Amino acid sequence: MKNKILDLSTLDKEKLMALSVYIEALEEDKKEQLIHVLHKAQSLFGHLPQNLQWFIARKLDLSSAHVNGVVTFYSFFNEEPTGKYVISVCTGTACFVKGANKVLDRILKLTKTTKNKMSEDGLFTIKDVRCIGACGLAPVITVNDKVYGNLKPSDVDKIIEQCRGEDYGH
Amino acid sequence: MKLIDKMINLTINGIELNVEAGTTLLEAAEKIGIHIPTLCHLDLHDIGVINKNANCRVCMVEDEKRGRLVPSCAEKVIEGMRIQTDTLKAVMARRTSLELMLSNHPQDCLTCVKNLDCELQSLAHEMNIKEIRYQGEKMNHPKDLTSKGIVKDSNKCIMCRRCVTMCDDVQTVGILSPLKRGFDVVVATAFHLDLADTSCTYCGQCVSVCPTAALAEMNDTPSVWRALNNPKKHVIVQVAPAVRAAIGEEFGFEPGTILTGKVVSSLRRLGFDQVFDTNFGADLTIIEEAKELIDRIQNNKPLPMLTSCCPAWVQFIEHQFPDLLDVPSSCKSPQQMVGALTKTYYAEHNNIDPKDIIMVSVMPCVAKKAEAAREELNKDGLSEVDYVITTRELSRMLKEAAIDFRKLDDEPFDFLLGESTGAAAIFGTTGGVIEAATRTAYEMLTGKELKDVNFKAMRGIEGIREATIQIGDMELNIGIAHELGNARKLLERIREGKSNFHAIEIMACPGGCIGGGGQPYHHGNIDILKKRQEALYTIDASLPRRKSHENPMVVKLYENFLSEPASPKAHDLLHTTYSPKERI
Ligand code: SF4
Ligand code: SF4
Ligand code: SF4
Ligand code: FES
Ligand code: FES
């Protein structure tokens, strides 16, 4: 596993160069700007594979454990490639009380996947996230940037079908 | 003008007190003799460990005015506060926090390596927990047994993060971090790598502060028992300087009691065929190191020279400063020198096939386990040191064998590799190695007798120390650092070309090996380290010979076997190499 992390050859050279240039251009305390660098890296690569995290740690002179800690703390960052539709299920207190777990289970079942793993057809990645500040609409999910509230399990079925439909339409 | 700190009035359990602003409730309560239980909290100012993330909540007290519970380790005093530490509400809150922690804990205390040494366990006792009302889902992480030094059992982790603070802030190695968050959070290596695949130095300082058995040393006692029970093997043991000043703590002696003679006799009782002294190797290390230093100074070779007897430090420089590998001395550590000589010099002397010898060392150190396994020190399929056990492991073996350590007579080491000087004794404390080396270098360089061997400027407990010693017409600039974060600062100076040192001593552990990761747990009492340190200086002062090159058995070794310091044979047996590694 160590060798896989130290091996940068699986990363796109041009994107890696672009990231290096971005990091070089950062002013002063580069270490403080880890979050920015991670955002930039995710926008370039789509996700943050572990060898890329190691590369960033070395570039910023931070420990890999710290970088990995930050990446796994924020649900915004993905260590794995994500599906076309990233569905975030709020499991904050209000949503939890209103059955967020049932919604989550239903979605995982329909998309035949587990948390944070892209579904086999490449369409879905499902995450649980903390309160997204729309408690009035609990339970809430987001599909990419779109918010869906006051969900019933049957709504979930419709949303998933819709995503699939859109995709076949293309 | 002296700044007057603002003073705050409050009451704790009805007792009025007046303390400086910024004091925590915990500290304030301590001042009036009120004990509040704590767990995650750890404040070892002297060695730079300050873990204050207040996440365990076993220190809750009641703030009567505001009508709520607050964590006393983090909450600061406020004017007019009324605190109660012993109301039913406060006691129950503390109990609940602890019970929740216990609810998903493995609860296998009987067979746990930390049994009777565990802070979680003693807290359960102290707080009179007789049943655990909650049943949590148990964690199910695999145990990490991949490294030679450390076992990581995340199922026993209570997320206090003391280890993270130690590894990040003090050692600046950065191996551990909380990963994920909320219910899924776990303190782990980057990407859940095997510890053996990381840049861990095995200094064991995370083990020293972990309140539970989530981090512990690898248990090598079964291998040692097997060796001792193998009639075909000649089993030899060596003991490091810092062990004799600390092992007593496991048997009820005052910290700092010197127990050399009892350690020797206890090892004979366990059945070792020969009991050698790592201090012999320390004297030898000094002679080789002093010789190397003089050679580097006189022949314009790379300076400064850094000591190389601490394997955690060697691992650190290989991973963190791979561009500076020409600065450490090429000398092996005393443990490895004794190992190498046991399997050559001693074996020849006694006509024993080195393959039939098993060399065991007793060390204050976890990193020595990993050192013994280094490729460079296991050439041609012959290991120099076969098994390393820590001071703690030895004390467990003695208890297991029902040896009454307190009642043992004092016995001397066996003779071939058993003699040592005062210079070797102080190897176990920060500043000791370089002081010993200076004593020898002085006489080697000037040819004159060094009258006063006490270099007080090199002693002490500050993290970084500097001293300039006049030797003949040259000034020798000495640097000393203990803890790897301090070592990093000196290395950065060297890298930037801003160092004028000739020699630098580095030890990874707070206080040097006396504070090693394999020593009896200090449980946050740093005075214990100071007492162990004093003990080593006492041994030094009490010995008739205090310069390594005056060790008669070392002189004989050169005469009969190695010919002279830095001879080709000495190089072959007593020196080693380093190689750059990736930091991960
Ligand atoms: S042994 Fe030392 S380097 Fe390794 S994780 Fe523990 S504190 Fe960090
Ligand atoms: S491993 Fe030990 S020190 Fe580290 S967080 Fe867990 S319990 Fe605390
Ligand atoms: S200072 Fe001593 S005990 Fe600590 S890692 Fe180094 S050699 Fe081992
Ligand atoms: S708890 Fe779900 S939006 Fe706030
Ligand atoms: S000791 Fe205060 S919160 Fe852990």
Image (cartoon, coloured by chain):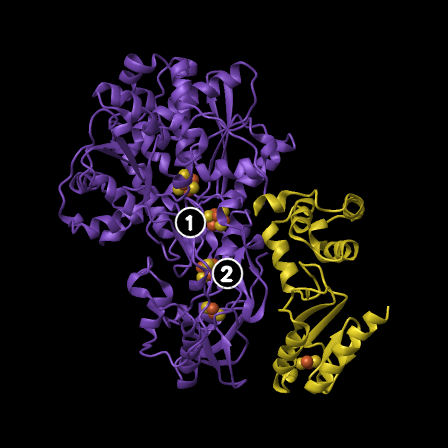
Chain colours: A yellow, B purple
Give the side of residue A114 with respect to residue B392, left or right.
right
- Residue B358 sits in quarter: top left
Taking the image as drawn, is residue B57 in sight?
yes
Q: Ligand 2: does it lie within 8 Å of the C-beta at label 2? A: yes
Is B485 above or below relative to A97? above
Q: Position of residue B498 (x, y in %)?
A: 63, 31
**Front position in the image: B576 or B357:** B357
Instruction: Describe residue B95's horizontal placement relative to residue B396 as left or right.
Output: right
Q: Residue at x 38, y 26 (%)?
A: B285
- Chain under disc 2: B
Instruction: State the residue at coordinates (63%, 61%).
Output: A72
Q: In terms of image quarters, where does ligand 3 lie?
A: top left
Residue at which label 1 appears: B150
Please provide percent x and percent y for residue A28. 75, 48
Report the residue marked by disc 2: B161
Mark 1 within 8 Å of ligand 1, using the beta carbon: yes
Say which of marks 1 and 2 sits in front: 1
Q: Name the amino acid type tagged 2.
A: Arg
Location of residue A127 in the rendering, given as x and y in whole percent from the top left corner: 66, 70
**Residue sitting at x 35%, y 35%:** B426
* Residue B460 visible in the current orientation: no
Label 2: state its secondary structure: loop
Instruction: Kindly identify the amino acid type of the residue bearing the numbered disc 1.
Output: Ile
Instruction: Please identify the quadrant where the C terminus of chain B is shown.
Output: top right
Q: Is residue A81 left or right of residue B279?
A: right
Q: Secondary structure at mark 1?
A: strand
Above or below, comparing residue B42 to residue B515 in the picture: below
Name the foreground residue: A7 vs B249: A7
